[in-house]
Image (cartoon, rainbow, N blue to C red):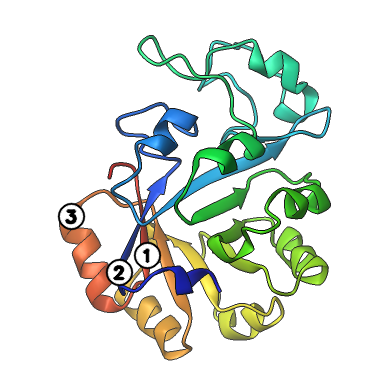
């Protein structure tokens, strides 16, 4: 369902928004990702069960909130009191709901944390399911999502090769596979393509490498600048 949004064979995704030019995973980064085909961002659950957009387990690296507490130990109110942008662009941490209001392009939502309110996630994206692909390294989230809504588009994330990947993906009723550039070898891509698997590779910024992967049959590339 997700791939029907695109007519061209090769796609570029804005990794955490246009993060090379703007603060990652912020509304301003998403607003300036117009040159990409779709936008990718990460979600986590706060202590008070709000779904927010952030990559790291703590807000330390990407904000003025210099705490070692994890996102699931902090409330949305606590997080909203800090700058998740920089000295040029002041940005509050966005909620999933806030991002969905401004983003017009298709979206790849990565579930970053082990804890997630999947029912709430599905409620928030209701009516926009055809424009959303949900991915995660925590594959149990994806299996549960398919149980809750069989029509939702999901993609498994992996950083290591799986010899039984075709059979493994069948367990999740999907053929979407997002893999690290470290395992995106010519041989592995050929193997995946022969199994009719939709391959997306993260994260690549060099034009020549992107071209070579598209030539091999990769469907989408996650890029930091677009």
Is residue 167 rendered to the left or right of residue 107?
Answer: right
* Circle 1 Cα neighbour tier, 10 Å, few/some/many (<14 / 14–19 / ≥20): many
Is residue 11 rendered to the left or right of residue 149?
Answer: left
Q: Mark 3 highlights which residue?
A: 207
At x 41%, y 33%, the residue is 29
Q: Is residue 82 above or below residue 187?
A: above
* Circle 3 Cα neighbour tier, 10 Å, few/some/many (<14 / 14–19 / ≥20): few
Q: Mark 2 highlights which residue?
A: 10
Q: Which label's residue is closer to the chain start, 1 or 3?
A: 3
Q: Position of residue 171 (x, y in %)?
A: 71, 80
**Circle count:** 3
At x 65%, y 38%, the residue is 97
**Residue 177 vs residue 90, the one in the foreground:** 90
Q: Mark 1 highlights which residue?
A: 220
Is residue 195 rendered to the left or right of residue 134?
Answer: left
Q: Position of residue 214 (x, y in %)?
A: 26, 71
Quarter in which the C terminus is drawn: top left
Q: Which label's residue is closer to the chain start, 1 or 2?
A: 2
**Closer mark to the observer between disc 2 and disc 3:** 2
Q: Which label's residue is closer to the chain start, 2 or 3?
A: 2
Distance, label 2 to label 3, CA atoms, is 13 Å
Q: Position of residue 43 (x, y in %)?
A: 63, 41
**Residue 216 vs residue 83, the one in the foreground:** 83
SS class, disc 3: helix
Q: Are marks 1 and 2 in contact (CB under 8 Å)?
A: yes
Asked if residue 199 shows in the view, the reply is yes
Name the residue furthest left.
208
At x 77%, y 52%, the residue is 123
SS class, disc 1: strand
SS class, disc 2: loop
Q: Position of residue 184 (x, y in %)?
A: 37, 67
Distance, label 1 to label 2, CA atoms, is 6 Å
């Amino acid at each position: 369902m997700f791939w029907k949004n695109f007519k061209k064979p090769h796609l570029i995704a804005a990794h955490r928004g246009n993060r090379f030019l703007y603060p990652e995973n912020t509304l301003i980064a998403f607003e300036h990702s117009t040159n990409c085909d779709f936008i990718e961002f990460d979600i986590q659950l706060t202590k008070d069960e709000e779904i927010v957009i952030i990559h790291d387990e703590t807000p330390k690296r990407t904000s003025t909130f210099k705490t070692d507490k994890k996102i699931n130990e902090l409330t949305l109110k606590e997080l909203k009191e800090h700058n998740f942008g920089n000295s040029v662009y002041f940005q509050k941490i966005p909620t999933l709901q806030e991002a969905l209001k401004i983003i017009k392009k298709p979206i790849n939502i990565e579930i970053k944390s082990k804890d997630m309110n999947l029912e709430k996630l599905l409620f928030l994206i209701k009516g926009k399911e055809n424009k959303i692909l949900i991915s995660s390294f925590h594959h149990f989230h994806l299996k549960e999502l398919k149980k809750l809504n069989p029509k939702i588009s999901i993609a498994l994330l992996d950083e290591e090769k799986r010899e039984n990947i075709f059979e493994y993906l069948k367990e999740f009723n999907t053929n979407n596979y997002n893999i690290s550039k470290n395992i995106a070898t010519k041989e592995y891509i050929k193997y995946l393509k022969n199994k009719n698997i939709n391959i997306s590779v993260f994260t690549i910024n060099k034009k020549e490498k992107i071209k070579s992967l598209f030539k091999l049959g990769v469907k989408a590339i996650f890029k930091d600048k677009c």
